[in-house]
Image (cartoon, helix red, strand yellow):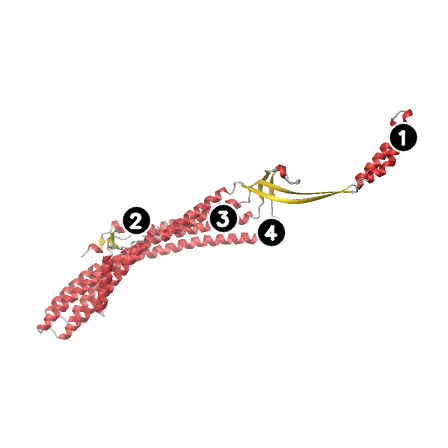
């Protein structure tokens, strides 16, 4: 089973090497992470979309001009009652005829009187021919092109509230973008130095296996010379096989870490991490330095922007209590073919105030104010949470740093103990179990040291990301005085 696992691990390691992995420093990987991350690209698009929407709200005070055209077919029937006008006309005519003879000389009055009598006798016939009701009906098709315009003069604060909410939405998108960028840097540190951890563990387990191979060879020689019994050789053999399994497992984990890093950086050919694990022996600046910049962190900025959106909602709710004024106008571009009741053009100002609404405006305003208070509390809580995370991350970095430095003396003691036990075993003075324990202690110490360095790097990235100082990671990397890849 051990041979099978070892051979499969070697095959995977060979397949990784066959891909001709590209050597890449951490700075070079950092330069590629933005282009290789679809998540960051999505955040960029979201920011751009919110900026465009905010820009669109800047023209809300401009007039809205629209053109319309319609074809109208209509029929109109008019009915006019002529009874009253006809009677008035008959009476007026009779009065006129009765007074007409008196307006002539005496010699002509008799003749004029006779004429007026004859005309008066004919009046009933003349007016009888006029109908009592006059009806008129027309049918036509009208083409009506028109240009209309409307411009808000006063909206009760609705437009400023909408614009403020759109601006706050931009701040939310930018905060998410910054947070996503920080998270991508932490993921890069995890993946990049995770590959280094896997490589270091593979190297350490290979050294352990080689050491046990030497111990087994020495044990067999001592058995042949009659110095130790065969049982001690079997003890070394068991330990050597366990070391072989650990080596095979480390190879598999290294192959997995290399594949994960290649996918993270979108490098199908594979990536060979060049920058080693590092630790700064000097302690970090005080935790207060990182907490002082808490207002610039993405979570605090996003919470503040959410509070601004809620505040804009309060302004929008208040606008429902206020009047609204609009200027409007319309122009008929086909006056010659217009309906009789349609004006050629119209312009005016409209003032509207809602006296009674079917939507409870008071409850709506109260709800908006509650949302504003909730957003303010969320912003305060976000700052507390970020401060707690900064303190926790700072403590993790300091713990990993101290653990790494303390393991230096442990590593030197483990190596010296192994050397002493090896000499004693070869001389037949120490049992094989002591030699196995010494080798296991050295392997465990090396693993703890590698783990402490990785915990330091990952906790440092987390601290800098939480405090929105992730760009300072390369500064700590450049001035690091302890690098595992350069040590023997």
Q: Is residue 479 above or below residue 96?
A: below
Residue at which label 3 appears:
312
Q: Which of the 4 image quadrants contains residue 80?
A: top right
Query: In this orientation, which residue lies closer to the viewer: 205 or 151?
Result: 151
Q: Is residue 335 left or right of residue 31?
A: right
- Could you tell me how far apart the alpha carbons at marks 2 and 1 are, in whole angstroms? 121 Å
Mark-to-mark CA distance, 1 and 3: 91 Å
Of label 1 and label 3, which has the lower sequence position? Answer: 1
Residue 429 appears in the figure = no
What numbered label is drawn on residue 357?
A: 4
Q: Position of residue 413 (x, y in %)?
A: 18, 62
Residue on which disc 1 sits: 113
Q: Secondary structure at mark 3?
A: helix
Residue for point 36% across, 51% down: 40
- Counting residues from the start of the chain, the first of labels 4 and 1 encountered is 1
- Residue 443: x, y in percent? 21, 64
Q: Earlier in the sequence, mark 3 or mark 2?
A: 2
How many residues crowd mark 2 within 10 Å: few (<14), some (14–19), many (20+)?
Answer: few
Q: Is the Cβ of the residue at disc 3 closer than 8 Å to that at disc 4?
A: no
Residue at position x 20%, y 54% in the image:
486
The residue pinned by badge 2 equals 31
Q: Residues within 10 Å of mark 4 (few under 14, many from 20)?
A: few
Tell whether 374 sits left or right of 124.
left
- Residue at the far left in the pictured view: 225
In whole angstroms, how far apart are the C-alphas of marks 3 and 4?
A: 22 Å
Distance from disc 4 to disc 2, alpha carbons, whole Å, reads: 58 Å
Q: Is residue 41 above or below residue 332?
A: below
Q: Residue at x 51, y 54 (%)?
A: 370
Q: Quadrant of the N terminus?
A: bottom left
Whichever of labels 2 and 1 marks the residue nearer the N terminus, that label is 2
Q: Nearer the viewer, mark 3 or mark 2?
A: 2
């Amino acid at each position: 089973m051990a041979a099978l696992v070892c051979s499969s691990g070697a095959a995977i390691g060979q397949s990784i090497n066959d891909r001709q992995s590209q050597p890449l420093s951490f700075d070079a990987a950092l330069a590629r992470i933005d282009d290789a991350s679809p998540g960051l690209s999505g955040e960029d698009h979201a920011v751009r979309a919110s900026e465009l929407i905010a820009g669109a709200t800047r023209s809300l005070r401009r007039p809205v001009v629209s053109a319309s055209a319609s074809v109208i077919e209509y029929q109109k029937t008019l009915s006019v009652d002529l009874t009253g006008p006809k009677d008035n006309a008959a009476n007026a005519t009779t009065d006129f005829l009765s007074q007409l003879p008196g307006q002539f000389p005496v010699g002509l009055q008799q003749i004029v009187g006779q004429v007026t009598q004859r005309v008066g006798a004919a009046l009933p016939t003349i007016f009888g021919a006029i109908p009592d009701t006059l009806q008129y009906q027309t049918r036509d098709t009208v083409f009506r092109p028109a240009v209309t315009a409307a411009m808000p003069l006063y909206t009760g604060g609705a437009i400023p509230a909408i614009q403020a909410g759109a601006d706050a939405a931009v701040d939310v998108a930018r905060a998410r973008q910054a947070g996503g960028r920080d998270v991508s840097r932490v993921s890069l540190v995890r993946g990049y130095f995770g590959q280094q951890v896997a490589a270091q563990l593979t190297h350490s387990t290979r050294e352990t296996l080689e050491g046990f191979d030497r111990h087994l060879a020495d044990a067999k020689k001592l058995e042949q010379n009659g110095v130790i019994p065969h049982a001690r050789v079997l003890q070394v053999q068991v330990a050597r096989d366990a070391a072989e399994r650990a080596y095979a497992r480390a190879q598999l984990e290294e192959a997995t870490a290399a594949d994960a890093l290649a996918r993270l950086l979108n490098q199908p050919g594979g990536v060979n991490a060049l920058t080693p694990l590092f630790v700064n022996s000097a302690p970090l600046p005080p935790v207060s330095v990182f907490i002082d910049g808490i207002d610039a962190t993405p979570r605090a900025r996003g919470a503040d922007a959410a509070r601004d959106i809620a505040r804009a909602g309060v302004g929008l709710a208040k606008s429902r209590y206020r009047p609204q004024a609009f200027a409007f106008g319309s122009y008929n571009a086909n006056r010659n073919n217009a309906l009789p009741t349609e004006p050629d053009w119209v312009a005016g100002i409209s003032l509207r105030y809602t006296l009674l609404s079917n939507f409870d405006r008071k409850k709506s305003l109260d709800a908006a104010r509650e949302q504003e208070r909730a957003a303010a509390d969320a912003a305060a809580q976000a700052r507390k949470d970020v401060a707690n995370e900064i303190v926790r991350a700072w403590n993790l970095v300091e713990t990993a740093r101290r653990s790494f430095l303390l393991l230096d003396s442990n590593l030197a003691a483990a190596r010296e103990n192994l050397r002493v036990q090896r000499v004693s075993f070869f001389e037949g003075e120490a049992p094989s179990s002591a030699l196995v324990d010494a080798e296991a202690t050295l392997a465990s110490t090396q693993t703890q040291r590698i783990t402490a360095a990785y915990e330091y790097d990952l906790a440092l990235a987390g601290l800098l990301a939480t405090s929105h100082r992730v760009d300072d990671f390369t500064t700590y990397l450049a001035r690091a005085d302890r690098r595992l890849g350069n040590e023997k």
